[in-house]
Image (cartoon, helix red, strand yellow):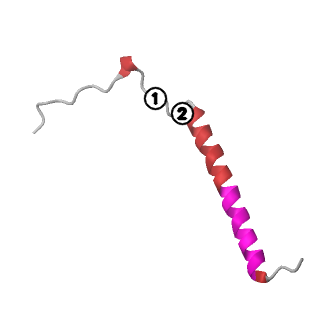
């Protein structure tokens, strides 16, 4: 099989895109499952803003 240089470049770019996509998916699932950014529970809702501010 004879590969031209353009075919080799396209294969390399495709591999980079696949690796970046897999890394992004794994990182997003790690961020979503971590406790670093907990979602507020119903009992800990934001306090209402002060209405006296002008």
Q: Is residue 16 above or below residue 47?
A: below
Q: Residue at x 83, y 79 (%)?
A: 3
Quarter assignment of residue 17: bottom right
Residue at mark 1 to residue at mark 2: CA–CA distance: 10 Å
The number of numbered badges drawn on the structure is 2
Q: Residue 51: where, in percent of width, then height?
A: 13, 30
Q: Residue 31: where, in percent of width, then height?
A: 57, 39
Is residue 30 a member of the stretch shown in magenta? no
Q: Nearer the viewer, residue 15 or 2?
A: 2
Q: Residue at x 11, y 31 (%)?
A: 52
Q: Residue furthest right?
A: 1
The range drawn in magenta is 6-20
Q: Residue 7: where, in percent of width, then height?
A: 76, 77
Q: Residues within 10 Å of mark 1 (few under 14, many from 20)?
A: few
Q: Main secondary structure of the magenta part?
A: helix
| Quadrant (top left, top right, bottom left, bottom right) of the C terminus | top left
Q: Residue furthest front?
A: 1
Left or right of 34, for residue 15: right
Left or right of 49, for residue 44: right
Mark number, residue 52:
none
Q: Residues within 10 Å of mark 2 (few under 14, many from 20)?
A: few
Q: Residue 13: where, in percent of width, then height?
A: 69, 69
Q: Is residue 2 above or below residue 49?
A: below
Left or right of 1, for residue 34: left
Q: Residue at x 80, y 82 (%)?
A: 4
Q: Is residue 42 above or below residue 2?
A: above
Quarter assignment of residue 44: top left
Q: Which residue lies under the disc numbered 1? A: 39
Mark number, residue 36:
2
**Mark 1–mark 2 contact, CB under 8 Å?**
no
Is residue 10 a member of the stretch shown in magenta? yes
């Amino acid at each position: 099989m004879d590969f031209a240089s353009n075919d080799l470049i396209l294969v390399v770019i495709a591999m980079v895109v696949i690796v970046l996509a897999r890394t992004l998916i794994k990182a997003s699932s790690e961020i979503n499952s971590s406790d670093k950014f907990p979602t507020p529970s119903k009992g800990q809702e934001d306090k209402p803003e002060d209405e006296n501010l002008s």
